[in-house]
Amino acid sequence: MNDKNLLLLDKLITLTKEHKLDWEVYEQSDLELNLEKTSFFNTSISTRLLTQPFIPVYSRSYIARFNKGYIGLFAYTYMALSNRVELVLQADDESSPTTIVTSSNEDAEISSKVKRLYNLIDLNIDKTNVSAYIDEILND
């Protein structure tokens, strides 16, 4: 499974670099994952989030639509001492979201690629915001 996850991360990094994924800040996006949807035996992702020590930071989390599904990169913090990022996929509007990998993965290569993807997205969002602000100043 690690090989498939590495291929997935490589593909997402490439699509992000080529601007083929339209990443949005989760907190500001109209796109949403079914965080409340549960399977028969499992609790919802949002319920699990509330019971773990890491707190989601939606203002630093990102989402993109790909075909019929969604790709989420969620940032978490723990008492401002530790941070973590989770890659979450949801196949379509009716599916439950599934955590695929995290930046705290035991596999150093996976952990590194999750962080790299997050930093690429974060940097592009910041550049877009600064560019819009420059345009605002110039047009005032």
Image (cartoon, rainbow, N blue to C red):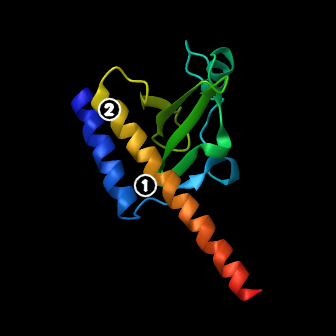
Residue 15, picture quadrant = bottom left
Residue appearing at x 62%, y 28% in the figure: 77
Compared to residue 131, the image places residue 88 above or below, namely: above
User: Which element is circle 2 on?
Assistant: helix
- The kind of residue tagged 2 is Ile
Q: Amino acid at mark 1?
A: Asn
- How far apart are the two marked residues, 2 and 1, measured between alpha carbons? 24 Å
Between 26 and 65, the residue placed more toward the observer is: 26
99 lies left or right of 43: left
Q: Tell me the element at label 1.
A: loop
Quarter placement of the N terminus: top left
Residue 47 lies, in percent from the top left, at 67, 20
**Front tag of 2 and 1:** 2
Q: Which residue is mark 1?
A: 67
Disc with the residue nearer the chain's start (2 vs 1): 1
Q: What residue is shown at x 62% (from left), y 65% (from top)?
A: 129
Image coordinates of residue 131 in percent, x first then y, are 59, 73
Q: Look at mark 2 in the image and give the residue it sits on.
A: 110
Foreground residue among 70 and 21: 21
Where is residue 20 shown, x and y percent of the image?
Answer: 40, 63
Q: Is 49 on the left-hand or right-hand side of 20?
A: right
